[in-house]
Image: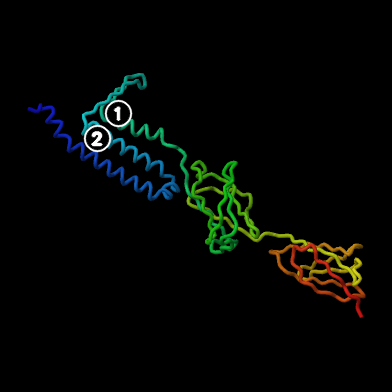
């Protein structure tokens, strides 16, 4: 015949099992939220809080199962604030899961971050599409990401200790530069904006001028009318010009000298080998 104590224990099992099941289902639901919304939770800085809730529910589930459904027991004795601390039963199991899980889980969390790049006219002025990179200086380690179709550069895993911190951010591009290059930007998820402007580019243009016999021709005035730049050739017939332009392209070059025919050419900015000859005027 079963003892009264055993009958009472059996009668309590359904209640403990129900509590354990409810805690487990809540824990499972939180895990789904944690995995499905990891990016958003990380961006809001809530991922550690959700993880801690999971630990509490796991501790409750294990405690109820071990000390309610199974015939288990545990006791801990120690001192606290000069007195004696004694814990027993389910409290020990829950504490082991919660405290142990919190201590041994890796504490290095990250958050995603997006940098939107646009021109001086505002966010709708997308001047860089699938071109250039954004650089964030995170401590001594710069990180870069390519600029996409919508002018965005996505950083999937910024270390959590940089959340809200001010870091240097700039754009690397052949044709554009940051408006506020070198300024600090505060990393407040989910994003920041960077304004860019056309680079001020200096292009050389040079070469030599000779006569019909191939001899260097000095005193030839070489002009770029569009840029109001001119220079006379030296004794070796050499000229060297420099202009500020927004890109490398063909320009109109005019060469003239008294007693010779004026010549028009269309060299490309950056070319230092524009060599040509002048014919004598009839």
Q: Position of residue 75 (x, y in %)?
A: 28, 24
Is 108 on the left-hand or right-hand side of 61? right
Q: Where is residue 32 in the image (x, y as percent from the top left)?
A: 34, 48
Q: Nearer the viewer, residue 64 or 49?
A: 64
Name the residue beneath numbered marker 2.
65
**Looking at the image, is mark 2 or mark 1 nearer the viewer?**
2
Colouring style: rainbow
Secondary structure at numbered mark 2 = helix
The correct choice, above or below, for 60 with respect to 281 in the image is above
**Residue 92 shows which numbered tag?**
1
Q: Quadrant of the C terminus?
A: bottom right
The correct choice, above or below, for 247 with respect to 258 in the image is above
Please tell me which residue is depicted at 50% across the width and 43% down the height of the picture.
159
Q: Which residue extends farthest left?
A: 1
Please tell me which residue is depicted at 37% across the width and 43% down the height of the picture.
50
Please tell me which residue is depicted at 33% across the width and 45% down the height of the picture.
30
Q: Position of residue 10 (x, y in %)?
A: 14, 33
The correct choice, above or below, for 42 with respect to 178 in the image is above
Q: Which of 212 and 45 is in front in this view?
A: 212
Q: In which quarter of the image is the N terminus?
A: top left
Residues under labels 2 and 1: Cα distance? 13 Å
Is 176 on the left-hand or right-hand side of 4? right
Q: How many other residues sit within 10 Å of disc 2, few (<14), some (14-19) or many (≥20)? A: many
Is 45 on the left-hand or right-hand side of 115? left
Task: First in sequence, mark 2 or 1: give its number.
Answer: 2
The correct choice, above or below, for 172 with respect to 78 in the image is below
Does residue 218 appear in this view? Answer: no
Does residue 77 appear in this view? Answer: yes
User: Residue 195 appears in which quarter of the rendering?
Assistant: bottom right
Secondary structure at numbered mark 1 = helix
């Amino acid at each position: 015949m079963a003892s009264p104590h055993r009958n009472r224990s059996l009668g309590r099992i359904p209640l403990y099992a129900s509590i354990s099941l409810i805690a487990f289902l809540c824990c499972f639901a939180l895990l789904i939220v944690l995995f499905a919304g990891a990016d958003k939770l990380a961006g809001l800085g809530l991922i550690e809080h959700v993880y801690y809730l999971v630990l509490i529910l796991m501790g409750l589930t294990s405690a109820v199962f071990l000390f309610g459904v199974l015939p288990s027991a545990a006791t801990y004795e120690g001192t606290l604030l000069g007195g004696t601390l004694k814990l027993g039963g389910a409290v020990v199991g829950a504490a082991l899961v919660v405290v142990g899980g919190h201590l041994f889980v890796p504490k290095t969390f990250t958050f995603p971050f997006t940098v939107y790049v646009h021109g001086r006219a505002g966010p709708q002025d997308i001047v860089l599409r699938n071109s250039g990179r954004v650089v964030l200086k995170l401590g001594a380690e710069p990180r870069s990401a390519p600029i996409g179709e919508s002018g965005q550069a996505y950083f999937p895993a910024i270390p959590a200790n940089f959340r809200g911190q001010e870091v240097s951010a700039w754009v690397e591009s052949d044709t554009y530069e940051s408006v506020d290059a070198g300024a600090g930007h505060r990393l407040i998820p989910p994003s920041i904006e960077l304004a860019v402007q056309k680079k001020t580019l200096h292009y050389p243009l040079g070469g030599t001028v000779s006569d019909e016999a191939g001899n260097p021709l000095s005193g030839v005035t070489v002009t770029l009318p569009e840029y109001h730049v001119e220079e006379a050739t030296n004794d070796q017939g050499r000229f060297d010009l420099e202009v500020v332009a927004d890109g490398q392209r063909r320009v109109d070059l005019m060469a003239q000298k008294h007693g010779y025919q004026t010549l028009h050419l269309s060299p490309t900015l950056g070319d230092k080998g524009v060599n040509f000859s002048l014919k004598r005027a009839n």
